[in-house]
Image (tube, rainbow, N blue to C red):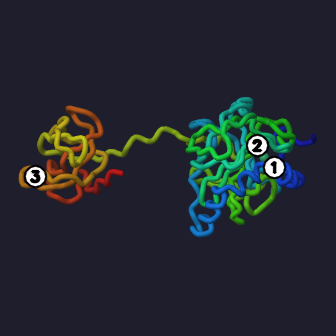
């Protein structure tokens, strides 16, 4: 090859024919399944359902290089690990959103292939995997391991990388076309950011797949008396105390009515007790502000607990 090691355009027009012919078994097994049907019906009726908020298909915190290559490869992406490129081979591939596996098979040109149906007509496709760890029909969640990055199939050019495609099932046949230029291959987005356009490269894109959730936002309030803590806003068995002082709370919730010093309120505040456990509830009556939805010391309404 006269090209640089990075220039590994994987799927050319010739693969398209092979993709259709060679993957006949997998296509037959899925396209006529009940799942494929219902997905396409939903797609047709729901007009435009928002795409899933995909995450990179790799472990939280890993950095990856994304390449679109030329217009016969874009909007597909080739992914290699950075800064440790040799670690690409064998890296774990994770589901980028919840869904159901609708293809998992060996393809003579693309190697190990997986396709996931994410619902609403949205699909993702993975090529050249070293191995596959999910079967057709299997449900996956965000972060479920589906396989390992490899360089299987001649169109990988022997270069370890993940060839990744996002797709939309325009013709409602319960799958998306992949591996060649087609309307059903769509721009790829991760964590709300789009990575598309021929000849583009992005370096060190960090995966946020299944990262630990951010700590909850804290709102500061002042409780004017020592307040009893309860397991829920309707609970009647006191499980601890919140001291009369400036305290942080997480959110508000409706519950049973409490009166303290002429302040009657059915609002409660989720907080960590001073005596007792975390994530318990105290009555907002102790803020001494009456019965309206409680506000923090900055006058900001404390949102309802989700
Ligand atoms: Zn590729």
Is 302 or 155 nearer to us in this picture? 155
Q: Quadrant of residue 3?
A: top right
- Depth check, mark 2 against mark 3: the one in front is 2
Q: Which residue is mark 3?
A: 259
Pointer 1: what residue? 23
User: Label 2: which residue?
Assistant: 105
- Residue 220 horizontal side relative to residue 187, left or right: left
Viewer-nearest of labels 1 and 3?
Answer: 1
Measured from the top left, where is residue 34 in percent x and y? 64, 57
Q: Residue at x 93, y 40 (%)?
A: 1
| Residue 24 coordinates in the image, percent (x, y) | 81, 51
Residue 209 in which image quadrant: top right
For mark 2, does the 10 Å Cα neighbourhood hold few (<14), some (14 to 19), or many (20 or more) residues? many
Q: Are marks 2 and 1 in contact (CB under 8 Å)?
A: yes
Residue drawn at (79%, 49%), measured in percent from left and top? 25
CB under 8 Å between callouts 1 and 3? no
Give the quarter of the image for residue 89.
Answer: top right
**Which element type, helix, strand or loop, lies under badge 1?**
loop
The answer for how far apart the CA atoms under marks 2 and 1 are is 8 Å
Give the CA distance from mark 2 to mark 3: 65 Å
Counting from the top left corner in percent of width and height, residue 49 is at 57, 64
| Residue 14 drawn at (x, y percent) | 90, 53
Kindly state the secondary structure of the residue where label 2 is placed.
strand
Q: Nearer the viewer, residue 119 or 295?
A: 119
């Amino acid at each position: 090859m006269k090209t640089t090691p990075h220039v590994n355009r994987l799927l050319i027009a010739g693969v398209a024919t092979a993709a259709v012919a060679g993957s006949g078994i997998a296509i037959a097994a899925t396209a006529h399944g009940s799942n494929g049907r219902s997905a396409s019906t939903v797609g047709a009726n729901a007009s435009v359902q928002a795409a899933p908020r995909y995450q990179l298909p790799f472990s939280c915190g890993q950095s990856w290089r994304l390449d679109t290559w030329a217009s016969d490869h874009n909007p597909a992406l080739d992914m290699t690990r950075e800064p440790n490129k040799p670690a690409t081979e064998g890296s774990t591939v994770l589901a980028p959103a919840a869904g159901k596996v609708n293809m998992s098979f060996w393809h003579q040109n693309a190697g190990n292939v997986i396709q996931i149906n994410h619902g609403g007509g949205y699909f993702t496709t993975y090529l050249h995997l070293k191995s596959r760890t999910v079967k057709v029909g299997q449900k996956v969640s965000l972060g479920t391991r589906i396989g390992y990055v490899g360089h299987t199939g001649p169109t990988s050019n022997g270069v370890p990388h993940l060839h990744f495609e996002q797709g939309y099932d325009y013709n409602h046949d319960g799958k998306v076309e992949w591996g060649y230029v087609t309307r059903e291959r769509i721009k790829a987005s991760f964590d709300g950011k789009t990575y598309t356009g021929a000849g583009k490269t992005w370096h060190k894109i960090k995966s946020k797949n299944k990262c630990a959730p951010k700590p909850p936002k804290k709102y500061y309030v002042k409780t004017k008396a020592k307040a009893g803590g309860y397991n829920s806003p309707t609970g009647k068995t006191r499980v601890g105390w919140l001291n009369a002082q400036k305290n942080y709370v997480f959110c508000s919730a409706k519950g049973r009515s409490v009166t303290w010093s002429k302040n009657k309120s059915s609002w409660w505040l989720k907080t960590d007790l001073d005596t007792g456990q975390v994530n318990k509830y105290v009555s907002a009556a102790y803020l001494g502000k009456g019965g309206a939805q409680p506000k923090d010391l900055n006058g900001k309404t404390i949102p309802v607990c989700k």
